[in-house]
Amino acid sequence: MDDQHTTHLARPDLQIPPSRSIVNICLVLGPSDPGLQWLPAPIFSFLIRHQDAGRTLVFDLGIRKDWQNLSPNMMSLFKTLGWTLQVEKGVHEILDEGGIDTSKIEATILSHHHFDHTGDPSTFDPSTNLIVGPGFKECMLPGYPANTASPILESDYTGRNLVELDFTALFFLLDSPGHTVGHICGLARGTSAPSGSSFVLMSGDAFHHAAGIRLSPYLSLPKEISPDPFSSLSPQRGSGDGCSCPGSVFESLLPNGLTQPFYEPARLAVHSFHHDVDELVRTVGKLQEMDAHDSTFVAAAHDESLLDVVSFFPASTANDFAEKGWVPKCRWMFLLDFAEAVDRGGEAAKKRQGWAPL
């Protein structure tokens, strides 16, 4: 137990083999997702570089700039849902402008096949491998136009090496099915020290909002949440540094008690974006083991709560996230989205002990 949060179960041993080999990790901020009805949904990609070995990877590619050229299957879905996209730059273009020699990128890795993660692999050099999760080839190939119903394009993989992972060995790409067939997460070692390593977990769409992974059996609401997630709503609360709010304010919003997430994956009969919800719940349970450790920075592809804390490419890497305090600063920021819900009842206001009203 520490002064930042309370745990119900001891944090599990992740059993990650020690190593002195680290990579540089940069978050690449792409275009926004049309996604949820009321929650902003940025799209994060990740640039991963091993400088000594001269190797560069990219994890997820956001939305392609020419989204109108997506498969007819996808364009029909957009029409049904009433979506219109505005994409100023693709990930390849962002990397070029940031000084990355994209012709030397060894591989692009897709966490899964949804349009807001596949981008446009054809913009990368033919020597750049395309890495996908298990079951991808059987379920997704061939792409459009060979298969008129496919959500992906033949041009995404034609003329390059398409590598499907089989996970016979652990290479910091994690089999995390449920959201889609073949969904994968990336785990990169950012620092290595005698006291232990630090890692960045690129969790794709294993969860879309941090309320989908927190709370957990290992991480419960702290008695005092600091920094105050509501600090941005009132100048009287200051910047959030040194300010806190009581965790009890949110207890009425927990549907399944103090050790389960605020949100469960949606079980929709129509237009569901989850392939297997029960499997997804199991995947989230495994990621919660990593999320409980301050030495692991968990970054979902659309986590809006990270925006005001983290630094993006090309300004800096994420390797020193622990030194910068990203984990404690980000961990409870998602609670800002519940401001209206906790204010709706008078009890929340009473518990604020003299806070300025929202």
Image (spheres, helix red, strand yellow):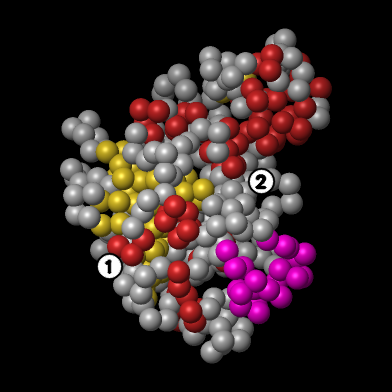
Q: Main secondary structure of the magenta part?
A: helix
The answer to whether residue 320 is left or right of residue 205 is left
Q: Which mark is residue 275?
A: none
Please say whether residue 77 is one of the residues in the magenta stretch: yes
**Which span of residues is magenta-colored?**
65-85
Q: Position of residue 191 (x, y in %)?
A: 27, 38
Q: Which residue is tagged 2? A: 40
Label 1's element? loop
Dot 1: within a 10 Å radius of its alpha carbon, few (fewer than 14), some, or many (20 or more) residues?
few
Q: Please name the amino acid that badge 2 sits on.
A: Pro
Q: Which residue is tagged 1? A: 168
Label 2's element? loop
At 48% from the left and 79% from the top, the residue drawn is 155
Q: Position of residue 205 (x, y in %)?
A: 53, 56
If the image is split into quadrants, where does the N terminus sit? top left
Name which quarter of the figure residue 210 lies in: top right
If the image is split into quadrants, where does the C terminus sit? top right
Q: Foreground: 254 or 137? A: 137
Q: CA distance from mark 1 to mark 2?
A: 37 Å
The answer to whether residue 93 is above or below residue 16 is below
